[in-house]
Amino acid sequence: MAAVLVWEVEHVGSVALSLAIAAGGLTVGVIVSRRLHDDLEQLADHYEALLKTADEESRKAESASRAKDEFLATLSHELRTPLNSILGWARLLGGGKLDADQTARAIAAIERGGWAQSRLIEDLLDLSRIVNGTLRISTQPTLVQSVVDESLTSLQPAADAKHLTISTSIDSRLQPMWVDSDRLRQVVWNLVSNAIKFTPPSGAIDVSLGAVDDTLRLVVRDTGIGFGADVAEHLFERFHQGDSSTTREHGGLGLGLGIVRHIVELHGGTVSASSAGAHAGATFEVRLPIRRAEEPTAKAPPAPLPSLRDVSVLVLDDDGHALELVRSALEPCGAKVITASTVAEASERFARYGPDGTNVIDVIIGDVMLAGGSDGVAFIRDVRRAESRTGRHTPAIALTALARTEDRRRTLTAGYDMHLAKPVDPYELAAVVSRLAHRRLDDEAAAS
């Protein structure tokens, strides 16, 4: 048998070459080395890991898509439910056949539906601010006991309707501390209303407020339906609900607790939830670092209606109901209200009552988004261009449903002096109009 001489050549890449000289000629062979085998195994493991990751990402995407679809379906339901009540009762009122008791019930139902829509919109706007990182807090010296008391007072009717007992344990010795009072009120309202929603009739809710060292503790306990560990880990996630099916017993968008967590964290605090399980009640606890402040001054008594005598107000809005609301808010104060539903009408009326007229426009109120291809921003720009030739400046308020930061920036840049988001309190609107009108008169008196 002929001898075979073999040279092992260093592997090139991951392949080893062997040269063999045997009887009868030269043979060149390619032998797969052990290193290539190991590399292939590693590659296979890496590929398997990539497939697993891709599969997980796919499941997450599918879950996110389902959550989005469920949220949109829930949003439609939550919008349509109060809208059905509002439109239905309004139609019956318009028919003029309701007796006094039914009329009172209709008005109350419309008001409840309106506030439900308002709260829903505010939650959605807060969600948008959270996602964009623009939700801010503005702290001031606050007696937190008063904030909790006011929130519970506003929720008492809802508790009474379900025959729920709300007990409180509030430490009256708490000193004023730096918090955003409006946002803290939102935290209390969301937690207690959540307890009311998930506590069966004749149940109990306990709210306690106190301090431990330098930490404020707000605890809301209920005897409600409770939750399991699988729900607890997702409670403060946006859009999450324990039951999002079409047969769910409780309404809502699942935004409230997510907003609570964000507000609490903006204050440097934490929020947690616990439950012993189904039908065992739930406990929510908020902890905030205490930053003490001097005691705030007592609230001033409600101010009387402002005087708008001899004040002319031009109101631009394509919604006739909105025009009527503004008229009803300002005319009892003595204002002369001139309305317009299009930019062309508003421009004509402003020119008629302009600086050269006998009766000038003292304040402009304009909606921003109008039908017909034009808007309140274009209108105020035209007004400011016209006034640049006369040196006069008519105070203007943008009264609009567009409430984002960029919307406010756009209206103020265009020439409006103030930006008010709908819905607006009629008395607040009258006070703002009065302040702007009298400031203009003071400025003109000083200039002369």
Image (spheres, rainbow, N blue to C red):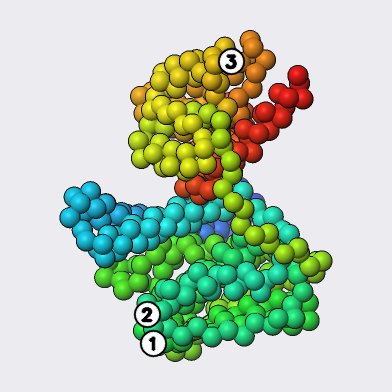
Task: Check the image and report above or below for 310 versus 19.
Answer: above
Q: Quadrant of residue 54?
A: bottom left
Q: Position of residue 53 (x, y in %)?
A: 48, 60
Instruction: Describe the element under mark 3 as helix, strand or loop.
Output: loop
Measured as percent of width and height from the top left, residue 100 is found at 26, 62
How far separated are the C-alphas under marks 1 and 3?
65 Å
Q: Which residue is mark 3?
A: 355
Q: Please give left or right for residue 274 compared with residue 388 in the image.
A: left
Residue, x 59% and y 59% (percent of image)?
A: 35
Front one among 312 and 121: 312
Q: Are marks 1 and 3 in contact (CB under 8 Å)?
A: no
Describe the element under mark 1 as helix, strand or loop: loop
Chain-order first, disc 1 or disc 3: 1
> Residue 162 — which label?
2
Does residue 237 appear in the picture of this structure? no
Q: Is residue 89 above or below residue 174?
A: above
> Where residue 261 appears, x then y in whole percent?
58, 66
Occupied quadrant, residue 75:
bottom left
The amino acid at mark 3 is Pro
List the residue tagged with mark 1. Answer: 202
- Residue 300 occupies quadrant: bottom right
Packing grade of label 1 (10 A; few <14, some 14-19, many >=20) is few
